[in-house]
Amino acid sequence: MKIDREARILDLDPRNPDFVANPYAAYRTIREAAPVVFWQQYGFWCFFGYETVASALRDARLGRSLRHVASREELGWPPLPEQVRPFYAVDDLTLLEQEGADHTRLRRLMNRAFVTSQITALVPQLTQVVNDLIDRFPDDGAFDLIPAFATPIPLRIITGMLGVPPESGPQLLEWSHRMVRMYHFGRTAEDEAQAVAATHAFCAFIRNFLAMRATGSREGLIGRLLNARDEGEQITDDELVANCILLLNAGHEATVHGLGNGIKAIMESGLDPGDLLADEKAIARTVEECLRFDTPLQLFTRYALEDLDIAGIQLARGEKVGLLLGAGSHDPAIAPRPDHFVPGQATRHLAFGGGIHFCLGAPLARLEMQVALALLFRRCPTLRLAAPPVYANSFHFRGLESLMVHRA
């Protein structure tokens, strides 16, 4: 890693194995040298301090999309390559990529699945899912907690919320993994081809399911969205498909990483899980520290919707900026010992983003982690690492590829 302090230029390959294993040491060095830097490999300015990132997330002059203010041609951008257009034709219709009135309209509809009463009502089902998975743990020998525990919990919950058959979960998971490769740095032509193929297959699955729900039972969020459309709410079939895919992808991807990273953090902290998860308040504090300490989504991007000055830099309309959520959550300004796992030390973090794009599923993700972590360490108090945890070779999404443990 090289930092030109005067020019504020960062030279750091985000695929560097040492950086992937522990980006937080690099964040500390970068933030101390220049909290706003031009990251050479990405080709845009990036923010590393809590206040700067939090402010940018709320800044109405920055957006996830520019389509409502200018076309690609008006911005001087080249046309999208033909081979990736099918992916973006779907991705561009999701709530995450909308601004203005379209964002307000879609978020109001999607919020119906995440009201407090509906999230709270999931506790019995969530408790049963977690207990069933723990019942299947081997009594002897090492096993991997990611496929055995962290992955199936959010997948079963989100498929249940949407009303999708639970047996379809593994296939949906495979499509999701292929699609999110589009957000990784240095994606390959093969990554793009697989993402597009997964997009076509996922869309066909959802369209078929919508057709069945249109004339049959309308349980789950998909059914409620169909009812809302029939009652006059404005949502097209293409938007329905795109946002069902978004909910399935976002509804499990980050929570899998949150669970895996959190379990690792607790086991490596040297603190007693019994104390960390002693009661509801302790559980809530511990989950928030898990999210702050090892954030599942590290980098979120925004576009300048107009020419502007932000954090001391001039941006032209259409320029992209990178908001380092993990770096902001490790800022000493909000956590006195940012690189230590200390539940309760921070009352704020950036794991769920901020502003109008604050994570819609944050209440669900929190509940899943609270129930799962408390039950796991209550029923497996002697759980120990059996091998060094291995992070997946990706930067934007920080999560474990394997977490080998044993029960004694």
Image: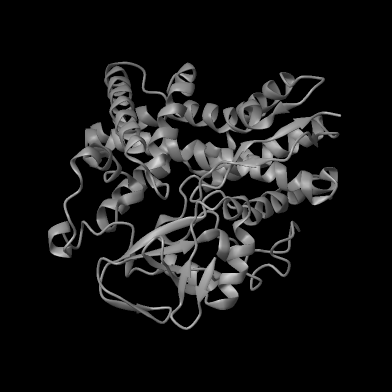
Residue 267 falls left or right of residue 17: right
Quarter that holds the N terminus: bottom right
Q: Quadrant of residue 198?
A: top left
Q: Which x, y percent locates residue 30?
A: 56, 71
Q: Residue furthest left?
A: 73
Q: Which x, y percent locates residue 56?
A: 43, 69
How many discs appear? 0
Front residue of 197 and 254:
197
Residue 162 falls left or right of residue 106: right
Q: Which x, y percent locates residue 247?
A: 42, 37
Q: How is the image coloured?
A: one colour
Q: Is residue 119 above or below residue 102?
A: above
Quarter that holds the C terminus: top right
Residue at 59% over, 30% down:
153
Observer able to see residue 235: no
Residue 229 falls left or right of residue 135: left
Q: Which x, y percent locates residue 90?
A: 27, 39
Front residue of 69 and 23:
23
Q: Is residue 139 above or below residue 262?
A: above
Residue 212 falls left or right of residue 288: left
Observer able to see residue 144: yes
Q: Is residue 66 above or below residue 290?
A: below
Residue at 63% over, 54% down:
22
Residue at 39% over, 47% down:
183
